[in-house]
Image: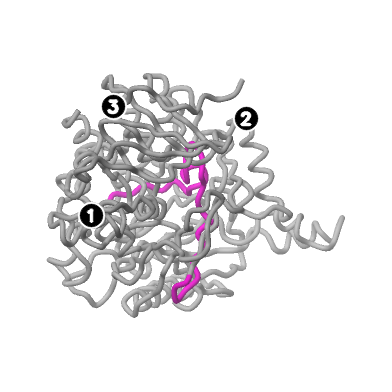
Amino acid sequence: MAANRQPSERADVCIVGAGPAGGIVADKLASEGYDVVVLEAGPRFDEADREQRMERSIRPAHGPDSVWEMGGPRDAYASTGERHYPLNAARVKGVGGSTLHWQGMVMRLHEQDFRLDSETGVGADWPVSYDDLRPYYADAEQALGVAGASDNPFAPPRERPHPLPAFPPSYSDSLFADACEALGITTHSVPNARLSESRDDRSACVGYGTCQPVCPSGAKYDATIHVARAEQQGARVVDRAPVQRLEHDDAGERVTAAVYATPDGSEHRQEAREFVLAAGGVENPRLLLLSESEQYPDGLANSSGLVGRYFMDHLFAGVGGTLDEPTRQNHVGFNTTESHQFYDREDDSRGAIKLEFLNYAGPSPVEMALTGDDWGDEMLDRIRDGYGTHVAMGALVEQRPQKENRIRLHPERTDDHGNPVPDVVWSLDEYTRRTIERANEIQREVLAELGADVQWTVGPESTGPAFHHMGTTRMGADPETSVVNPQLRTHDLRNLTIPSSSVFPTGGAMNPTLTIAALALKAADHVAERL
């Protein structure tokens, strides 16, 4: 039976995007009795296929983009900045969004992240404080089923424990523990959006170790959970319905419709009282720029000229090698120990560093078997000699907001609907380079204390993004210097809300999804107030 992709006759809210922000907003508003329609550019993925996708992900014949069917004209992009940005390497278009393949770590931003300019003179201040988001953080942890412990002395204050107990330290964590203690580095657990105990109809983590890009068991949170709850409460989710543009009224004060395409080549208009743009830090600004009009010749909601500006990501720093003893790498597919000791600071001399102790260093036995040229006993000997002795550390490093880093429309290249593709203009400044160098120094000190033979380093010249798209529709109190207000509503249009990492004025060095979830819950409250 063909899916019905006709517009709903009546909708209180139209949400663009069925990722974590869109799913959470849809769930909350549908539970309060509002008529909700969600338009998602990508398909629905069958949950029964996840084990097959996992198998595809570990076979070298398949590229990482193919696991979740990314690529081709639909997902075309450009990257014309100083550094190439591999946009499709870590995003998913489909119901669930990029949480289908994310790592699943969920930290709160630190209090200082919200007042960075005031305290260090670098970056910007948020128009909301940590205390403003604190109750939403707690609700977000409950909604995502976060497993964690209150053992991080550097974390901001919290009101209650994490919903589920933390995962225990891995074997390789125990090796790092003595070295860190000798160096005066305090370590602590990592909050994860994966079940350490069964919850509702989902089992606890069973240890596939393939968290990124596929969790076959469903223990790791993804947004299909909230999308399904929203649908059970009456929300309507239309897949394969990429929104082409947003239309507004004659006064230019309210969005009137989201115009979307369907697989049969037709276009439809979904009208609603309120609109929520939840398509991520790249597609959010792209859609606003595509929605230019006589009143908004530079793009919708862009009277400030900042739509697409201040694009940020987290940068990766890492050092790895081998030990003359077993490390049991790859037994755990996610981080269980970190250190935030090098995060907050008193001046602008050094950026924030989130230090990670990796549980997936070096090749797995499957990777070694599938990529080698030998067979039989020779293969077995190579696996025995090469597996189980690797050790590595990583870090996420803060990137300060820079106006010249941006998402814009490419002047020539178009997608499968004839729309200009997003062009990622991205570079690194000396502030970020110094922070990466500092992270590498710390990592080398720890590995030296361990007695490791260092074999590789990811430093300033070889770094890459964490694929945390932030800052392109920044939040602020002043309409001249921001795109959305502290209630996440655009300054220019009274019924357009953006609950996304695209509103972050600064990015810190913490994985952004928990903050996205908190902002989504906050945004849903404000939308409900207007309905």
Pointer 2 residue: 48
At horizontal 59% and vertical 45% (from top left) the residue drawn is 68
Q: Dot 2 surroundings within 10 Å: few (below 14), some, or many (20 or more)?
A: few
Could you say which is closer to the camera, residue 408 or residue 162? 408
Mark 1 residue element: loop
Q: Gap between marks 2 and 1, in whole Å?
A: 41 Å
Q: Is residue 82 left or right of residue 483?
A: right
Mark 3 residue element: loop
Tell me which label, 3 or 1, sits earlier in the chain.
3
Q: How was the colour assigned to the protein in this rendering?
A: one colour
Which amino acid does the dot numbered 1 rest on? Answer: Val
**Residue 233 figure quarter:** top left
Which amino acid does the dot numbered 3 rest on? Answer: Asp
Could you say which is closer to the camera, residue 425 or residue 4? 4
Task: Look at the image and tell me in which quarter the N terminus lies.
Answer: top right
Q: What is the x, y in percent for residue 513?
A: 36, 47
At horizontal 43% and vertical 35% (from top left) the residue drawn is 39
Mark 2 residue element: helix
Q: What is the x, y in percent for residue 271?
A: 33, 31
Q: Dot 1 surroundings within 10 Å: few (below 14), some, or many (20 or more)?
A: many
The segment highlighted magenta reads 80-108
Q: Is residue 222 left or right of residue 310?
A: right
Pointer 3 residue: 12
Q: Gap between marks 2 and 3, in whole Å?
A: 33 Å
Could you say which is closer to the camera, residue 112 or residue 68? 68
Dominant secondary structure (helix, strand or loop) of the stretch shown in magenta: loop
Pointer 1 residue: 483
